[in-house]
Amino acid sequence: MVNKHLVQYVCFLIAFCGSALTQITREFHQALSVSIAQPVSLNIELSEGDLQVAYRREGEVSISLQITADSNVPSDFLANLLSVSRVGNQINIRQQHSLDTSPDRIRFTYRIDVPYRTEVHSFLNSGKQTITGIMGPVSAEVNTGDLRVSYVSKAVVGHAVAGNLDFEVIGENAEAVTGRGNISCTRAAQGVSAETGDGDISLMVVGPSEAKVKQGAGRIDAGGVRGAFLASTDAGGVHVKAVPHDDWRLISVSGTIRLELPPASSFDLDVMTTSGEVVVARDDLPKLTVGVRQLNERANGGGKRIEVRSTTGRIMVS
């Protein structure tokens, strides 16, 4: 007797494979020679797809687009998809179809190879952006999707409505703002301003910085902060492990705030929680009795001011 579920599964595989066979891949490529005497200004506006901008060679901008789609995609749609214009070293790239007019089951993959001296201004409605290995500055925006920017010598500004932002090795100031998503930044010597409506923030080896989680249980983790630091969360925790080179202000409404400082560090500590708990585990600070919710002390002669505030959360200093 034939198994009914087996027959249904085989029919599904046949239908799936038949559908997969109807897919096609088409490619577009254009190379533009540019002056090496001036930086390249790249302006990108795309509706959907994955975008990668990366350093490759001097004197040329190479634009590649790969499309994977059903065979029934109208030929005029593909022919008129991309607009490329230029004035000197300013290059404008625009995807001319919106999400509402794109055929179903179509994927766009863009790769733009550029000289090192390139600045990027990009907007992507839906998809992922990756920008790496250029001088900058970079200004990148995505409505829905992730953004990764790395090895950029000048300033970086990245905004997302909903998506994760990941910055690494940024030479000048960085700004990362997302309405919903996580933010990570590693090695930004001039500092970073990071804000998420709901998500986690991780900062490692950064200059003077600010980190803000506006709502929810998002955490802030910071290590190697080399300057002034302001961290603020709602219900999430804050964990800072660094040498206090400048003043810090750490705030959490109900999350745990954990402060780790090297032995023999010099600092002024101002800690207070409304209804939480203060725990100290350092030899250069007095031991606290149960129920103490405020501490003002100078460690090792005093130094930079560290202010810690919580409403109902625990504060731990070690």
Image: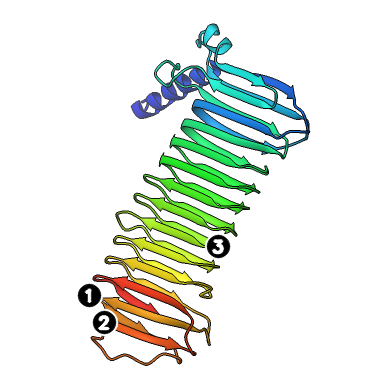
Q: Distance of mark 1 from mark 2, alpha carbons?
A: 7 Å
- Amino acid, disc 1: Thr
| Residue that label 1 marks | 274
Q: Label 1: few (<14), some or many (≥20) within 10 Å?
A: some
Pick whichever, 136 or 278, lies toward us.
136
At 65% from the left edge and 26% from the top edge, which residue is drawn? 90
The N terminus, quarter of image: top left
Mark 3 or mark 1: which is in front? 3
Q: Label 2: few (<14), some or many (≥20) within 10 Å?
A: some
| Residue that label 3 marks | 207
Give whichever of discs 1 and 2 has the lower sequence position.
1
Q: Is residue 290 above or below residue 35?
A: below
Pick whichever, 168 or 156, lies toward us.
156
Classify residue 313 by image quadrant: bottom left
At 40% from the left edge and 81% from the top edge, which residue is drawn? 269
Mark 3 or mark 2: which is in front? 3
At 42% from the left edge and 64% from the top edge, which residue is drawn? 230
At 54% from the left edge and 33% from the top edge, which residue is drawn? 122
- Amino acid, disc 3: Gly
| Residue that label 2 marks | 293
Give whichever of discs 3 and 2 has the lower sequence position.
3
Circle 3 SS class: loop
